[in-house]
Image: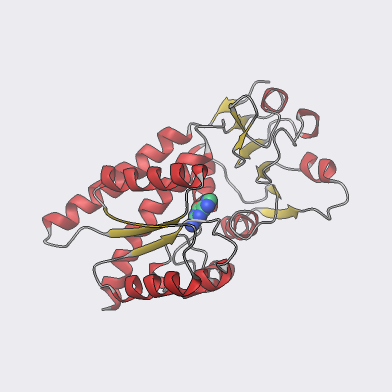
Amino acid sequence: MTARLIDGKAVAASVHDRVHSAVASRLARGLRAPALATILVGHDPASEVYVRNKRLACEKVGIRSVPVHFEETLTQAELMATIDRLNADDSVDGILVQMPLPPQIDPVAVTERIRPDKDVDGFHPYNIGRLAQRHPVLRPCTPYGVIELLKSVGEPFKKRTAVVVGASNHVGRPMMLELMLAGATATCCHRFTADVAFEVSRADILVVAVGKPGMVKGEWIKPGATVIDVGINRLDSGKLCGDCDFDSVRQRAAFITPVPGGVGPMTVAMLMQNTLEAAILRESES
Ligand code: GUN
């Protein structure tokens, strides 16, 4: 078997189209465009690329981009004051602080400072809690995008075994909540899991998000599984690769996401959707 590729760029483009149409219809009704503030601290090359892609996506779908850039020496108090100002600004619907942050800044305090109804990353404990309690409001973008990719290939979720490799706050844990919400029976593997290969071999749906190039081997895969590779690793050669050994995993899976061009574009697309949803949410509250 050679797995079919799940085209993240195409699925992301359809989300962008949906958001673009919704924004256009808002403008036609005399409402303003949604606005997204993206805060970048320092000059980490990967973060600069991610933030640039987010700002470009805003332009494409008609969302107003509010770029904020600070030097690496920024203090926690200065960042908190900026978040407070954006929290209070009625013309801003979404606030995103790009991670990682320099060591003098506490990322937990930053995440909790953003108003939950402007938290378009979906990282605030309120939004994670709503997802855990099956009443999601703003959902973490990457896991939300993975669910969209799975739906795009007709994944039924119910009565299916899902395995998530990686238990990070931003991907693995909310991914578990999303998969359970969708009806799958989900297991999470992490650094203390006794036998990751065994857990993976049971998966009808496999989501890998660990940041280790080629960690998941083809022989671990249940024949016919759907494999979502969230990892984006840059090799010494400069080539990007995922957390799965792509060629061998592809021989056993039915569907697989490529890296690049799989999950990456979906994270940005779901951010656009969350920003639109945040604008609608605040209007309904006021
Ligand atoms: N750093 C890497 N991915 C993300 C993301 O999705 N959101 C934020 N805020 N920072 C990130």
Is 188 on the left or on the right of 65, as rendered? right
Q: Quadrant of the N terminus?
A: top right
Q: Position of residue 79 (x, y in %)?
A: 44, 69
Q: Residue at x 83, y 53 (%)?
A: 193
Closer-to-camera residue (58/129):
58
Whether 10 is drawn above or below 194: the answer is above
Is 250 on the left or on the right of 8, as rendered? right
Q: Position of residue 221 (x, y in %)?
A: 75, 34
- Is residue 246 visible in the rendered image? The answer is yes
Is 219 on the left or on the right of 14, as rendered? right
Closer-to-camera residue (231/161):
231
Colour basis: secondary structure
Whether 93 is drawn above or below 222: the answer is below
Whether 33 is drawn above or below 199: the answer is below
Q: Position of residue 65 (x, y in %)?
A: 28, 54
Closer-to-camera residue (141/203):
141
Spot the residue most to the right: 194
Q: Residue at x 55, y 56 (%)?
A: 100
Q: Residue at x 57, y 33 (%)?
A: 257
Q: Quadrant of residue 30?
A: bottom left
Whether 74 is drawn above or below 220: the answer is below
- Is residue 151 visible in the rendered image? The answer is no
Spot the residue most to the front: 73
Is 127 on the left or on the right of 171, as rendered? left
Q: Quadrant of the C terminus?
A: bottom left
Q: Position of residue 93 (x, y in %)?
A: 31, 65
